[in-house]
Amino acid sequence: MEMYFIYLAATLFLILGIGDLGRSFISRSTTDFTTGEVLSTWSPNPEAVKRGNSKWAIFSYSINGKKYISKNRIQVSMTTKVGDKKTIRYDKKSPEKLYSFSIKRGVLLCTVSVVLFVIGSFKLL
């Protein structure tokens, strides 16, 4: 029974990883990167809650000399603080819109998926 859960998790990670890689590939000509400063953060649970929590941030950034404030929040690490500088991806046509998908996360999710498939195939658990 636990092998089904391993295969289910592996499939889910593979789908999420391919989704991130696909969106990165498709949007490579309509998005660009810049450095932004965290203006505010928000967590659905109190920050003291580490398990199952996330942190979301609004950024201030400059593109071609014009300042922008993001209209949407993107997920950041739990250690991120107001004032931190981060590399962010924005839409070239609508610079106030930020994207949170990444090639690194897509590769990581696909790698975890392959490891889980190997564990399931060779019954290593």
Image (cartoon, rainbow, N blue to C red):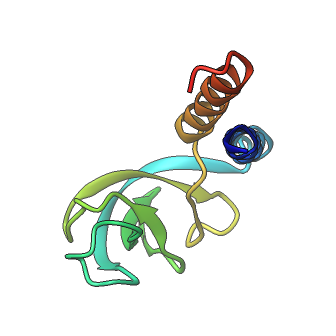
Is 68 on the left-hand or right-hand side of 85? right
Residue 29: name its quadrant.
Answer: top right
Please state the horizontal and vertical placement of residue 2, each as a whole percent of the image.
Answer: 67, 43
Is 48 on the left-hand or right-hand side of 104? left
Image quadrant where one finds the N terminus:
top right
Please state the horizontal and vertical placement of residue 33, each as a whole percent of the image.
Answer: 51, 47
Image quadrant where one finds the C terminus:
top right
Residue that protrudes farthest toward the front in the picture: 1
Q: Is residue 23 above or below residue 95?
A: above
Residue that protrudes farthest toward the top in the picture: 122
Instruction: Say how many tags the image has.
Output: 0
Please state the horizontal and vertical placement of residue 71, each as a whole percent of the image.
Answer: 53, 80
Is 104 on the left-hand or right-hand side of 53? right
Residue closest to the eye, 7 or 59: 7
Q: Is residue 110 above or below residue 63?
A: above
Q: Is residue 118 above or below residue 39?
A: above
Residue closest to the eye, 110 or 99: 110
Please state the horizontal and vertical placement of residue 95, each as a whole percent of the image.
Answer: 58, 66
Residue at the spot 19% in from the left edge and 76% down from the top edge:
48
Residue closest to the eye, 35 or 13: 13
